[in-house]
Amino acid sequence: MLPPLSGNSTRFIHLFPVGIRPPLLPCHRDEEEMTDMKKVVRRKLTFAQLLQDAGDLLEIERGETIYQPGDSSDSIYLVEKGRVKLVYLDESGKKLTLAILDPGEIFGEMCLVGEETRRHQASAIEDAVVRRIRRKEFARIMEEEPLYLQLLLEHFARRVREFEEALEDFAFKDIQARLSRRLLKLSDEYGVKTKDGILISFQLTHKELADMIGSARENTTLALNRFAREGILDKSRYRIIIKNEDELRAKINAQN
């Protein structure tokens, strides 16, 4: 996740890793170059394709830490299999889940923008395989094919958008609105349609859900119980079925 931006836009210059020059953008490109660019866009390149032969593979057991605050920030990681959770830990032990990552997603990318030590924890929430690419090797890959920088910039843009949404939630939304947004996001990313509603397709404790919205477990449980009474969802110990997405959206919009 990107740090807050200052009032001017010069921060974006540093999105490019040290040693990489941004591709030149002349006013006019020849026809052959434009054709090559269109081919790249049409292929819908992914980090999995870009990095398939790079770095080394690490097998991570469920619950195992990949890196933690204070570790050297010198590599980018690609999730090959399983899921990885990024968590911010404060000095008092409070947790805030920054992201849950699926196969094909990268993390640890802040080493490209000057981060020297990690500021959050990365761990596997199920048995996983991740590909570790050292910063210099990643820079070499970018230098060999500058058009791949578009993929990296799109990734950073998504991170900025997610950061802005999180700031909005914490600043202006109550727990019901924050929980509603998170449930809709989980439904969109992991939902499976059933006869009873949309099942979130991986085990999720109330504590893990609370960490995603920056709330205490007890308050999250109270909000979930209220949603269940209102017929918005059904829940058991590790399972949530969303029955009424429109009501969740209404709870978000009620505070807009």
Image: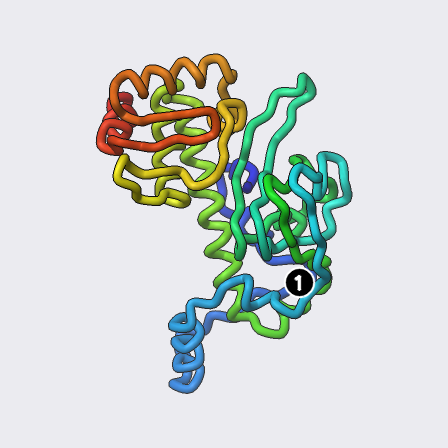
Mark 1 is on which residue type?
Answer: Phe
Residue 204: image x %, image y %?
49, 32
**Vertical placement of residue 39 versus 139, above or below:** below
The reply, left or right, for residue 64 in relation to residue 214 is right
Give the camera-side residue of 225 and 53.
225
The reply, left or right, for residue 204 in relation to residue 200 is right
The reply, left or right, for residue 98 in relation to residue 250 is right
Quarter of the figure that contains the N terminus: top right
User: Residue at position x 69%, y 44% from top?
Assistant: 61
| Res 181 → quadrant | top left
Residue 183 seen by the camera: yes
Quarter of the figure that contains the C terminus: top left
| Res 236 → quadrant | top left
User: Residue at position x 52%, y 41% from top?
Assistant: 100
Residue positioned most to the bottom: 32
Residue 122: image x %, image y %?
65, 40
**Vertical placement of residue 60 versus 147, above or below:** above
Residue linked to disc 1 = 138
Secondary-structure class at tag 1: helix
* Mark 1, other Cα within 10 Å: few <14 / some 14–19 / many ≥20: some
User: Residue at position x 41%, y 77% from top?
Assistant: 39
Residue positioned most to the front: 195
